[in-house]
Amino acid sequence: MLVLLIVTAVAASLLVELGLMVAREISEAAQDVRKDERQMNGAFKTTSGAR
């Protein structure tokens, strides 16, 4: 019974770590997309103003 409790606790800990890694990757990807959008918006503004 104690072994089952320990195994369950270890599995839960690993799942939490995996969830945190996934959340961090999603957050970093969202920041990269926003940075790309800002760079694209800046490029469009400079090209349209060059006419």
Image: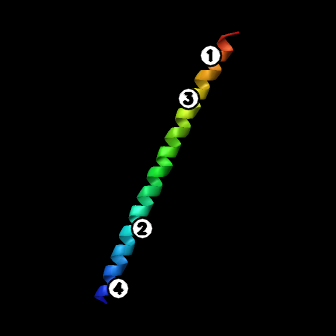
Give residue 18's quadrant in the image.
Answer: bottom left
Give the CA separation, mark 1 to mark 3: 12 Å
Colour scheme in use? rainbow
Type of amino acid at the residue the image marks with label 2: Leu
SS at mark 4 in the image? helix
Mark drawn on residue 15:
2
Mark drawn on residue 38:
3
The residue to which callout 1 is attached is: 46
Height in image: 33 above or below 27?
A: above
Give the CA separation, mark 4 to mark 1: 63 Å
Query: Could you classify mark 2 by the number of other residues whose Cα lies within 10 Å: few (under 14), some (14-19), or many (20 or more)?
Result: few
Type of amino acid at the residue the image marks with label 1: Thr
Give the CA separation, mark 4 to mark 3: 51 Å
Type of amino acid at the residue the image marks with label 4: Leu
**Disc 2 to disc 3: CB gap under 8 Å:** no
Height in image: 35 above or below 8?
A: above
